[in-house]
Amino acid sequence: MRNYHYAKAGEVMYHTGLTKEQLAGARYAVVPGDPGRVPGLAKALDPSAVFLTSHRDYTSWLARVSGEPVLVMSTGMGGPCMSFAVEELARLGVTTFLRAGTTGSIQEELELGDLVIDRASVRRDGASKAYAPAEYPAVADMTVTLALMKAAESLKVPYQVGISVSTDSFWPGQERYDSFSGYVRTSYQGLLSDFQAMGCTNFEMENATLFTLASVMGLRAGSVCGVVAKRTESESIAAQEVYVLAEERFQKTVKRALEMLIGHFMVTL
């Protein structure tokens, strides 16, 4: 029997700056990467959402959805920051994580502003390897993924279920040539076309760590990301209006999915 280390009353988490009392019993956490997205996402879930704290990469607000407390907390960028978030929120009683963010698509049929609901991720991060060997799959929780899918369908939001490629590098790790030097290691050249051929849908930087840690720890996790770069056409990030559209879509989708999960919805396969 594994001995889980839950937070004691009044104990402040070192990286997130949160206490169990602040979460008010929240079992669900919505985890965007960008701290700047947290207030808007929290208020989209609940207009009466309240600010909790901001410490390091982690800005936290508390909302209520269908009467349940829901934490909205940024994770910063990349696997290491995500691992701190999962570790500390699990100690505070969170059992379900919904990642919401932006991504670059690598399949032609995924358009700017569309959503990608990833059911798994290629583990090209580093942090997850501290928890499980490379052979261990990074897979999302089926119930959370189905809730996100049903939410997007009910809202008539264009989406695709996919497999992301999680990297620790935004430039050479994703075979981008618009960096300062333009240098991409020889062994990384051709990565994009290889992953396209394997049916992968998008590049991002947190899913592999989140999915792996959640599985290893017996937690649930899912992910929905809005497409803001179409890598089949350009390495450029899209205009601001695309960001706004993608954000509005994943905000609505996350809220509807939470309502379904909290209400213990039934799905017929």
Image (tube, rainbow, N blue to C red):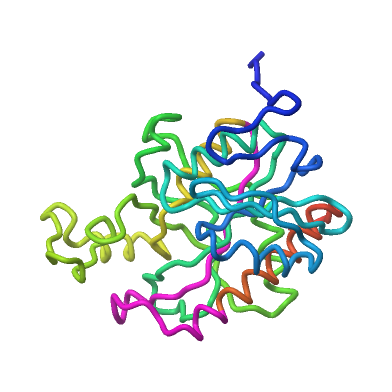
Left or right for 229, reference 211: left
Residue 222 image point, x, y percent: 60, 52
Above or below 110: residue 95: above
Q: Say which quadrant the C terminus sits in.
A: bottom right
Residue 27 image point, x, y percent: 75, 42
Residue 243 image point, x, y percent: 50, 78
Residue 257 image point, x, y percent: 73, 61
Left or right for 118, reference 232: right
Above or below 3: residue 142: below
Q: Is residue 177 magenta?
A: no
Residue extending furthest right?
67
Query: At 55% from the left edge and 41% from the top edge, which residue is drawn?
Result: 85
Among the 4 quarters of the image, the one containing residue 150: bottom right
Q: Say which quadrant the N terminus sits in.
A: top right
Above or below 202: residue 133: above
Q: Is residue 244 magenta?
A: yes
Query: At 46% from the left edge and 44% from the top edge, which residue is drawn?
Result: 81
- Magenta residues (range): 218-245
Left or right for 98, reference 168: right
Number of disc labels:
0
Look at the image and tell me whether residue 268 can be seen.
no
